[in-house]
Image: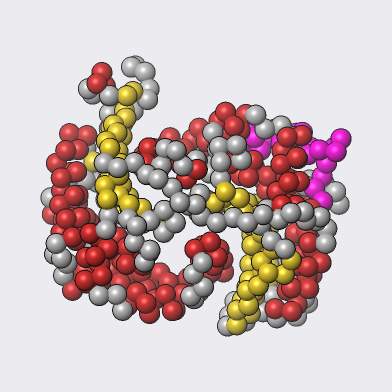
């Protein structure tokens, strides 16, 4: 496997992994922006509207037929948030045959990106109306997944004055303001000024891929491409929040943050604490003490924040919190067995090794790497994790500062806490 990564046009970087391992190739084109309350909904909805139709293929049926002619190639809209950066664009795959499909697939992708179906010098109003309605429904439905909702509320409280607190979908209010003309203006600005990351993996040479990508971007007029990088953000320190819904199961999240720049020490520490069925939280808080239905911990590499979570019976909130913090304190005091750290390393290394088994996993890995500025391939990262010693894990734990402890619980006692829903 041979990888080349370089800037091919101002603000446009191309990463090509030459590999004959798969029978398919993958292309991803992502425009980048620092997220804000004003642009989150727009960045999310733009690729969804673009996927509705082009000048040559004016609706989804015509686009589907064109993709079928390329042996079932797929082009899907995608938007993702990494830290305070939002990516918006497309990811596609197609089969590798003796008949070279790369030029045709890139040509169609260029149509979708740069020659959308329009009316009255704007997006088609019915397309925008439909996708706006879908987005609003998606935003409204977020509350149905209580753990995800609790995590989002934790982040909003933790980074209250930072763009990182902005939901990648935006809000109902920002989504409702979108119309065909305003979205078209934003789209034109995005494709002309936003930095762009292009990823390709497949059985083609770098030169073949670069030629087609350059040809595709000739359809787009680029002006004053800006730069995007993760921003420093202040976070709350040692505050508590309780909110209430009509729920039988409560969700408790304890968030902390570190200034340690070595993210893999912190990731390994997180894995020992709550990375799976062999972790301290699962083995002790869930299995031994039976204080929760589910538990674990996750680490955000961009914000250097840990989120320790559990799904609990509301009446167990206080004792569960103490048990979760006790397990974290065990990390600080070095109460870590060889088996725990070996299992955590194995899980992390296995995840990295299997990254190269999926084109989509590779794309996500290298997109994150581009933003983090870490160009080590998965195997090299895995080797670095293998060499992390227990003292480094302890040091990582000591560097975390408590931020927000958030509890989403039932309506009992709601008079003294914020109620999200009215009394029945």
The location of residue 188, given as percent across then percent down, is 76, 46
Residue 164 as seen in the image, left or right of residue 101: left
**Taking 28 as reference, is 3 above or below it?**
below
Q: Residue 117 colored magenta? A: yes
**Taking 420 as reference, is 134 above or below it?**
below
Q: How is the image coloured?
A: secondary structure
**Taking 405 as reference, is 176 above or below it?**
above
4 or 98, which lies in front? 4
Q: Residue shown at 16%/38% (left/top)?
A: 318
Q: Residue shown at 56%/41% (left/top)?
A: 36
Specify the quadrant that holds the C terminus: top left
Residue 337 as seen in the image, left or right of residue 153: left
Q: Is residue 321 visible?
A: yes
Residue 220 as seen in the image, left or right of residue 170: right
46 or 48, which lies in front? 46
Range drawn in magenta: 115-134
Specify the quadrant that holds the N terminus: bottom right
Q: Is residue 283 visible?
A: no
The location of residue 238, given as percent across then percent down, is 26, 41
Residue 368 as seen in the image, left or right of residue 277: right
């Amino acid at each position: 496997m041979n990888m080349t990564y370089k800037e091919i046009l101002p603000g446009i970087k191309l990463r090509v992994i030459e590999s004959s391992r798969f029978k398919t190739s993958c292309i991803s084109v992502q425009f980048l922006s620092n997220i804000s309350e004003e642009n989150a909904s727009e960045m999310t909805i733009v690729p969804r509207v673009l996927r509705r139709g082009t000048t040559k293929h004016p609706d989804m049926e015509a686009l589907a037929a064109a993709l079928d002619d390329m042996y079932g190639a797929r082009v899907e809209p995608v938007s993702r948030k990494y830290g305070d950066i939002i990516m918006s664009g497309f990811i596609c795959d197609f089969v590798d045959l003796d008949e070279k499909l790369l030029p045709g697939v890139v040509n169609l992708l260029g149509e979708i990106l740069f020659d959308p179906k329009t009316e009255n010098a704007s997006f088609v109003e019915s397309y925008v109306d439909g996708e706006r309605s879908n987005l609003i429904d998606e935003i409204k439905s977020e509350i149905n997944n209580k753990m995800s909702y609790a995590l989002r509320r934790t982040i909003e409280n933790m980074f209250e004055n930072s763009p990182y607190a902005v939901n990648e979908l935006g809000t109902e209010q920002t989504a409702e303001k979108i119309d065909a003309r305003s979205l078209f203006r934003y789209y034109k600005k995005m494709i002309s000024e936003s930095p762009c990351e292009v990823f390709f993996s497949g059985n083609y040479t770098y030169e073949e891929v670069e030629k087609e990508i350059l040809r595709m971007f000739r359809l787009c007029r680029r002006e004053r491409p800006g730069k995007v990088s993760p921003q420093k953000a202040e976070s709350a320190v040692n505050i508590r929040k309780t909110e209430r819904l009509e729920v039988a199961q409560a969700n408790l999240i304890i968030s902390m943050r570190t200034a340690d720049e070595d993210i893999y020490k912190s990731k390994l520490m997180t894995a020992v604490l709550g990375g799976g069925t062999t972790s301290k939280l699962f083995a002790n808080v869930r299995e031994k003490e039976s204080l929760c239905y589910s538990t674990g911990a996750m680490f955000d590499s961009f914000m250097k924040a840990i989120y320790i979570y559990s799904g609990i019976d509301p009446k167990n909130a206080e004792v569960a919190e103490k048990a979760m913090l006790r397990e974290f304190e065990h990390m600080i005091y070095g109460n870590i067995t060889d088996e725990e750290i070996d299992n955590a390393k194995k899980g992390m290394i296995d995840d990295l090794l299997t990254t190269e088994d999926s084109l989509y996993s590779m794309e996500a890995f290298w997109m994150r790497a581009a933003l983090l500025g870490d160009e080590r391939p998965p195997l090299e990262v895995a080797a670095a994790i293998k060499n992390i010693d227990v003292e480094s894990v302890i040091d990582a734990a000591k560097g975390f500062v408590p931020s927000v402890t958030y509890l989403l619980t039932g309506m009992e006692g709601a008079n003294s806490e914020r109620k999200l829903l009215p009394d029945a």
